[in-house]
Amino acid sequence: MAGRYLHALAQTGLPELLPAVLHLLESQVCPSICLGVMQSVEGHVGTAASNTLLKKFSKDDNSPGIWTSLGQCTVDAIAQAIRAEGHECSSIAAEVSLPGSIAAREHSMLQHAASRGHSVLARARTCNLKEAVKLMLFAPLAAALGKRLDQDAEVRVGVLFLHPETAHETESLMGGPPSRLPGKRKRGQTQASRRSQTGRVLTEGIISKAAAASHEDLEEICGYPPALPTQACSMAVRCRRTSCFVAGRYRKLRRDISNSQWMIDGARKGTTSVEEEIANILVPALRADGMKFNSAGREDIDALMLGTGRPFIAEILNARSGMPPLEHFQRLQQQLLEAATGVEVLHLKGASKDICKLLKDGETSKQKSYRVLCELPREVQPTDFEALSSVAELVLAQFTPQRVAHRRALLERERTIHTLAAEGVPDHPRHLLLRLRTQAGTYVKEFCHGDESRTKPSLTSLLSCNLPIKVLELDVTEIHMDFP
């Protein structure tokens, strides 16, 4: 092991450390620092991380992807796990996660070595172990898989080392004692309990904290020099693709479909959702773990979305297939159309992450057109059409509607009705059909009935009705936005 470690260390640009490191290897100090990581890379020691341990670790791990236990940290074992995932790619990126307790142990060793006359070690970088592991594992791994090694690659291979035996050392380093290590963060007991069992992975924050720790702190945390561990590292591997994005527009042709899954007191509202129907075609096609859905606003469950559809972006999580060509997306559009679910998609195509900002910016700048069927509390009169014929660029003062007050800030907002046209409905003397073009964010239903004077002016007040006008049907006929 020492020979390969020294070779890797030399290639990381630290050849001046070789004599001192060789002395430490021979004196058995090194295993107390790397916690057996280097021996694990050699395949001599190490255990597969249990599912229970990985489950606890994953609750605090913000990055996507599922960790798989690794019995041996060898090129062959990792290659087998990656092949099983089946990602289509020409290159891979290397990611190594080490136990956070290594930081305090390495600084303890550096200070101890300097006190014994090995002053050159005091200038060592604390992250060279990670670089050495990457060099030892990933160059031969890329060759075994027939892939290029590229840190900008979409497909990222991660190797995880956990060392529960020393997990408490990292918690001590990051959390106290307050008198010597300020900046203690209060965390929930559940998270703290998990971390005391799994440990944190090495980060720049932990390295900085260790570098600032005093001799007394390090002696209390991990010993001076650090004691040899009695247990090997637990290991896992994962292969994941960074999120890719698909943009398009959707049409909603039924009045029982929500934008996303809608549950009230455990009961489903509506028969399906736009998000679910789009996921049903995209997730299998890209062999992904899941999908996050974002649209340029959303219509009510009982409203149709017509015209050229509403813009949306689907963030595809851990796709194993590469981005398909435009012809494949066209086949997916046809597949959803033939399924007759009430949801259709148009203009599907792969997109970059930058398109998310375009969608976000459009939320406030876009205009929308509506068709609204209303019922007046009286019969429609010719004077009603006269009253509405001159409406243009009508500015509304809309206080947060009652129906959304539980989830929206209570504010008064100015919104504009750009155009409004009205016509009667044959055989329905009290019905009025409106066609409106409005500013984004306008509450159209509230404009019609007034929402008990929370919207001023309203259609009810413009037509001098003594009772609120009812909205029978509302359809979005166009989203005026250059997208995708």
Image (cartoon, rainbow, N blue to C red):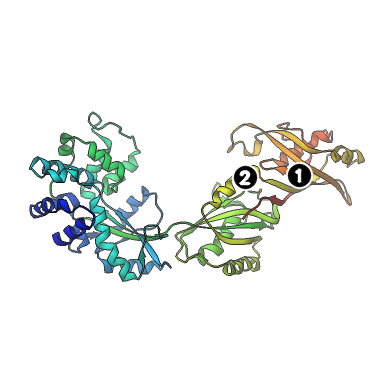
View extreme (right): residue: 382
Which-is-in-front pick, marks 1 and 2? 2
Label 1 secondary element: strand
Q: Judge the density around disc 1: few (<14), some (14-19), many (≥20) Cα neighbours within 10 Å.
A: some
Q: How many marks?
A: 2
User: Residue 276: horizontal and vertical position, in percent?
Assistant: 56, 58
Residue 366 is situated, as x and y percent measured from the top left of the image, at 66, 45
| Residue 363, label in figure | 2
Q: Where is the N terminus found, in terms of image quarters? A: bottom left
Left or right: residue 156 versus residue 123 is right
Residue 263 in view of the camera: no
Mark carried by residue 471: 1
Task: State the residue in front, 138 or 267.
Answer: 138
- In the picture, measured across the screen, residue 18 lies left or right of residue 462, that is left
Q: Is residue 418 visible?
A: yes
**C-alpha gap between disc 1 and disc 2:** 24 Å
Q: Position of residue 481 (x, y in %)?
A: 66, 50
In the displayed structure, does residue 265 sit left or right of residue 298? Answer: left
Q: Earlier in the sequence, mark 1 or mark 2?
A: 2
Q: Quadrant of residue 309?
A: bottom right
Task: Tell me which residue sits at (29%, 48%) in the image.
Answer: 201
447 relative position to 206: left or right: right
Q: Image point 36% across, 47% down: which residue? A: 60
Q: Residue at x 19, y 63 (%)?
A: 42
Which residue is at 40% across, 57% downward? 152
Q: Note whether 453 is above or below 474 in the view shown.
A: above
Q: Residues within 10 Å of mark 2 (few under 14, many from 20)?
A: some
Secondary structure type for disc 2: helix
Residue 300 screen position, x and y as percent = 66, 48
Q: Is residue 382 above or below residue 349?
A: above
